[in-house]
């Protein structure tokens, strides 16, 4: 038994130290990458949920119809058949939902139907 | 070099393997996280583009449905519209320095298959671009619904129904009243009304606009009148604007145990707020000297070139008793005329018959109605065009 222990090959202290140094360097190199990647994935998941909440709020505001502020702007174009300029004013509600990163905007014409 | 040194190499090998594993794992994770970031960004732009596309389509729809504004000749491509976040407003043609997205709108007519018939529909297509994302919103006019779609009458026979729960039209919807074949006409038949004949009974047709493409023949024929309900029956056309294509009122005197049959027409505004026009709003559209009340509300009724008559029917018993007056018909002189009607105005068949029986012309009856401010002729330049009215159709989101 003693003989076997004595003859068994093993790592020298230097080898072990070198290996630990390499592994530490590797971990130190890859850890921020892995951590930041995981954080980004988590953030993206949360953001997706937030986006659908914002979209839900927007859909609700559109369905309510009266949630926006009065707004009008000019629309124009050229009638292709007569080559006449067409100018008119669109009047309705400006509906806006936003958070610190995203702004959703739409326009609602008066409900006549 | 002794073989024992190879054990050190093995340790380095393990470390290298670890490098490979870690770099693969880290790289994959990094790539996935970046893809997630891009996905979120695309989702944001997609949402922004979608609502901007909706905005463009809605803005143009609002102009299209506004009777105060001129409609463009189709097809037309409108100038790009922008939304500036900094200024918080939409603008057209001039590109702001900082804008959220750009919207391009086209309006055109397209063929649409409806009830085995190809009809033309108006399509508003709005394409919005935010960043690299483009979204399209399409609004399409819905083909008009017919009165028989609402179970108001049979499209084959023209007989009016009175369902327990009458179907309703949308608040401003234009309903077309047409039978198949078109000339059959819409009439009051057996079971068209319920309730006691001693009460005045009303059959309402309520819509924003009513356009008749078939005649409204309240009695249809003498033989039909014999089996039709007794008493006073009003067909109430409840609309802000109505176009009639031939109208026949009917009156049959009662005999022995049967009571009169008086089928009249009532012109009413639809229920709800802001219906019709006030007297003050239409003053400039009628000839001077007309009696006009600012307190009353008015709608518009148009009679086309088809005959507008009141008929007095007499049964066979009358034929022996009196021997005259069978199917007497009085032209009412309303063809091609347009009027503002005061809410609730009745064209009473019996009253017209009595007026004519008194030696007067039917036309003078309507002169009296005009004098009373019930029917006011609309000046020609203020009259609506049936084709233009038919352009007013509800839009629905096609995409």
Image: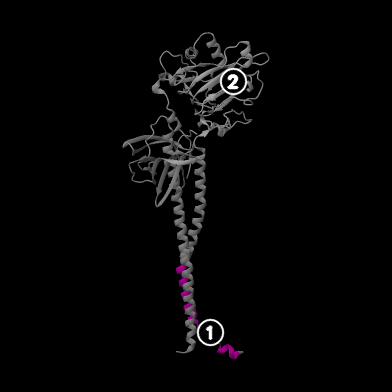
Instruction: Please determine whether, in this image, residue B81 is positioned above or below residue B288.
Output: below
Q: How many marks?
A: 2
The percent coordinates of residue B259 (x first, y second) are: 65, 16
Looking at the image, the residue that sits furthest to the left is: A83
Q: Is residue B348 visible?
A: no
Q: Quadrant of the N terminus of chain B?
A: bottom left
Mark 2, Cα crowd under 10 Å, few <14 / some 14-19 / many 20+, is: some
Q: Which mark is residue B222?
A: 2
The chain letter under disc 2 is B
SS category of the residue bearing label 1? loop
The percent coordinates of residue B46 (x first, y second) are: 45, 50
Give whichever of B286, B244 is nearer the camera. Answer: B244
The percent coordinates of residue B273 (x first, y second) are: 52, 27
Report the residue at 35% width, 35% height from top: A87
The boundaries of the magenta stretch are A2-30
What residue is pinned by disc 1? A10
Give whichever of A41, B165 is nearer the camera. Answer: B165
CA separation in Å, label 1 and label 2 = 120 Å
Instruction: Please determine whether, in this image, residue B285 is positioned above or below residue B37.
Output: above
Report the residue at 43% width, 44% height from top: B53
Left or right: where B345 falls relative to B84? right
């Amino acid at each position: 038994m003693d003989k076997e222990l004595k003859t068994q090959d093993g790592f020298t202290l230097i080898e072990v130290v070198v290996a630990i140094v390499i592994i530490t360097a590797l971990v130190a190199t890859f850890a921020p990458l892995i951590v930041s990647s995981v954080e980004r994935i988590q953030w993206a998941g949360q953001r997706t949920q937030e986006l659908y909440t914002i979209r839900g709020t927007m859909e609700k505001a559109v369905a309510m119809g009266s949630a926006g502020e009065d707004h009008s702007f000019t629309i124009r174009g050229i009638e292709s058949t007569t080559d006449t300029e067409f100018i008119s004013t669109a009047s309705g509600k400006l509906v806006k939902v936003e958070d610190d990163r995203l702004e959703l905007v739409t326009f609602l014409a008066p409900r006549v139907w | 070099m002794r073989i024992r040194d190879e054990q050190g190499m093995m340790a380095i090998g393990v470390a290298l393997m670890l490098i490979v594993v870690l770099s693969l794992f880290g790289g994959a994770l990094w790539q996935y996280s970046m893809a997630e970031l891009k996905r979120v960004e695309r989702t944001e732009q997609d949402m922004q583009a979608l609502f901007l596309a909706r905005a463009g389509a809605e803005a143009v729809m609002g102009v299209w449905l506004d009777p105060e504004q001129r409609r463009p000749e189709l097809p037309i491509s409108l100038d790009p519209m922008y939304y500036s976040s900094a200024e918080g407003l939409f603008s057209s043609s001039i590109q702001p320095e900082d804008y959220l997205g750009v919207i391009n709108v086209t309006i055109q007519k397209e063929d649409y298959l409806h009830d085995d018939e190809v009809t033309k529909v108006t399509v508003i297509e709005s394409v919005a671009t935010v960043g690299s994302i483009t979204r399209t919103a399409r609004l399409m006019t819905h083909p008009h619904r017919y009165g028989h779609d609402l179970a108001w009458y049979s499209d084959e026979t023209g007989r009016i129904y009175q369902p327990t729960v009458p179907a309703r039209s949308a608040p401003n919807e234009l309903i077309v009243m047409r039978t198949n074949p078109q000339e059959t006409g819409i009439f009051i038949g057996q079971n068209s009304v319920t309730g006691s004949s001693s009460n005045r009974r009303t059959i309402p047709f309520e819509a924003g606009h009513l356009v008749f493409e078939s005649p409204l023949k309240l009695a249809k024929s003498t033989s039909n009148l014999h089996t039709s309900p007794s008493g006073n029956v009003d067909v109430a056309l409840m609309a802000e604007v109505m176009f009639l294509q031939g109208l026949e009122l009917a009156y049959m005197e009662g005999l022995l145990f049967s009571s009169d049959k008086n089928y009249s027409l009532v012109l009413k505004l639809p229920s709800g707020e802001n219906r019709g026009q006030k007297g003050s709003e239409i003053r400039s559209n009628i000839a001077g000297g007309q009696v006009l009340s600012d307190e009353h509300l008015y709608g518009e009724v148009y009679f086309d070139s088809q005959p507008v008559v009141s008929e007095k029917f007499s049964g066979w018993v009358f034929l022996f008793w009196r021997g005259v007056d069978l199917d007497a018909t009085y032209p009412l002189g309303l063809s091609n005329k347009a009027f503002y009607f005061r809410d609730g105005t009745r064209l009473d068949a019996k009253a017209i018959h009595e007026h004519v029986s008194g030696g007067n012309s039917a036309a003078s009856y309507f002169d009296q109605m005009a004098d009373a401010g019930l029917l006011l002729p609309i000046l020609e330049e203020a009259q609506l065009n049936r084709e233009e009215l038919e352009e007013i159709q509800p839009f629905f989101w096609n995409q």
